[in-house]
């Protein structure tokens, strides 16, 4: 019997389900892949397409023509549908464009695949146009909707496609993914992992961008000092935020680091025996721990959590930062 394995780290539920669907022959023509950016959504889809197309007994083999083309991103039967350059919405025109190609015979593979990226960016009319394809799926066509939030899709779309979730990776899984990418386990890669908050894609991006990683850490250090050392006030903390955070990526990365520092501080205070996440060792958080109460640490962490999970892109980053940093400041004082 043909054997399948998907070369994916983590995402166990999604991968196990897809493997059983492949082996049992009950693969559906459409799936919604939901998870945060960099959590392996594209990897899951790519590995699945390879497995579906590969003729080897152990699929995907990674060597045959279709495997090689898919890996290289040059397979003409895979269409990636994403918002146009500089645009944030997936418009109805982009979805209608699918109708132009959907009837054409595939070239490289025995089927064709449409990968809708940023599914949460499909506006109402785009989703309705898409629904028609879903209701009468053409033969040998597969759809994957990749999204951070399946809840943003119409219930009629969600009911026609199973939603599979990809999960944040833990440290060992992150190290495994990075190793596969040829990135060694060292201080620099650990720092990238820490800033990436469970997203391997993000860790690789940060690792490969030297300036980011040092500057995230430097900014986080500055903000932590401002937050926990007695000679700062709210205004200078807010101003420092505005000065050092230039975009949403900065904000997520820097505040994810600050959360790790908070975890170290609470761990130190409670005498927990665990590995430090931010500081070189837990002892180094002693000085900071003098300036924040347990209650305030928990509150600050939950305020940061809440704010980082708001997926709305603020129209005015400076305004959002003012509100964000004020709330963090207030929380750390209670
Ligand atoms: Zn192959």
Image (tube, grey):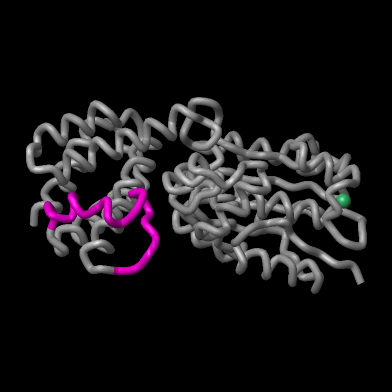
- The mark total stands at 0
Q: What quarter of the picture does the N terminus occupy?
A: bottom right
Q: Nearer the viewer, residue 43 or 244?
A: 244
Q: What quarter of the picture does the C terminus occupy?
A: bottom left
Q: Nearer the viewer, residue 100 or 236?
A: 236
Residue at 66% x, 55% y: name it. 44
Drawn side of residue 247 relative to residue 333, left or right: right
Residue 200, can we see it? yes
In the image, the segment drawn in magenta is 272-292
Drawn side of residue 322 relative to residue 1, left or right: left
Location of residue 73 (image quadrant): top right
Residue 125, can we see it? no
User: Quick check: is 147 in the magenta stretch?
Assistant: no
On the image, the x and y values in percent for residue 305 come to 30, 55
Predominant SS along the magenta part: loop
Residue at 82% x, 39% y: name it. 69
On the image, the x and y values in percent for residue 98 come to 69, 40
Drawn side of residue 67 relative to residue 158, left or right: right
Q: Where is 91 relative to 2, above or below?
A: above
On the image, the x and y values in percent for residue 287 come to 18, 50
Drawn side of residue 262 relative to residue 14, left or right: left
Residue at 62% x, 42% y: name it. 183
User: Quick check: is 278 in the magenta stretch?
Assistant: yes
Residue at 61% x, 45% y: name it. 116
Q: Nearer the viewer, residue 211 or 35?
A: 211
Location of residue 23 (image quadrant): bottom right
On the image, the x and y values in percent for residue 331 come to 14, 53
Q: Where is 80 relative to 282, above or below?
A: above
Q: Where is 285 relative to 28, above or below?
A: above
Q: Where is 123 relative to 12, above or below?
A: above
Q: Nearer the viewer, residue 311 or 29?
A: 311
């Amino acid at each position: 019997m043909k054997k399948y394995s998907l070369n994916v780290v983590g995402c166990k539920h999604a991968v196990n389900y897809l493997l059983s669907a492949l082996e049992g022959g009950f693969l559906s023509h459409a799936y919604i892949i939901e998870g945060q950016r960099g959590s392996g959504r594209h990897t899951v889809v790519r590995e699945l397409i390879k497995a579906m197309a590969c003729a080897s007994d152990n699929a995907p083999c990674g060597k045959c023509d279709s495997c090689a083309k898919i890996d290289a991103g040059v397979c003409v039967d895979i269409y990636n549908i994403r918002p146009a350059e500089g645009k944030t919405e997936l418009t109805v025109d982009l979805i209608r464009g699918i109708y132009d190609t959907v009837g054409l015979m595939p070239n490289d593979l025995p089927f064709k695949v449409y990968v809708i990226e940023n599914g949460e960016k499909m506006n109402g009319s785009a989703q309705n146009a898409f629904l028609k394809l879903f209701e009468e799926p053409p033969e040998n066509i597969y759809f994957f909707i990749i999204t951070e939030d399946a809840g943003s899709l119409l219930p009629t779309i969600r009911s026609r496609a199973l939603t599979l979730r990809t999960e944040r990776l833990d440290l060992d899984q992150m190290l495994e993914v990075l190793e596969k990418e040829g990135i060694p386990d060292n201080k620099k890669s650990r720092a990238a992992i820490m800033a990436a908050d469970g997203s391997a894609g993000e860790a690789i991006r940060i690792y490969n961008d030297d300036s980011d990683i040092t500057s995230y850490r430097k900014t986080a250090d500055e903000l932590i000092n401002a937050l926990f050392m007695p000679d700062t006030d709210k205004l200078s903390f807010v101003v420092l935020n505005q000065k050092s955070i230039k975009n949403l990526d900065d904000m997520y990365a820097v505040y994810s680091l600050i959360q790790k520092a908070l975890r170290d501080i609470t761990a130190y205070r409670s005498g927990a025996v665990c590995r430090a996440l931010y500081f070189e060792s837990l002892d180094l958080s002693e000085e900071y721990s003098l300036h924040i109460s347990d209650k305030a640490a928990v509150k600050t962490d939950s305020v940061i959590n809440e704010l980082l999970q708001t997926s709305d892109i603020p129209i005015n980053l400076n305004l959002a930062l003012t509100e964000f940093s004020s709330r963090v400041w207030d929380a750390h004082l209670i």
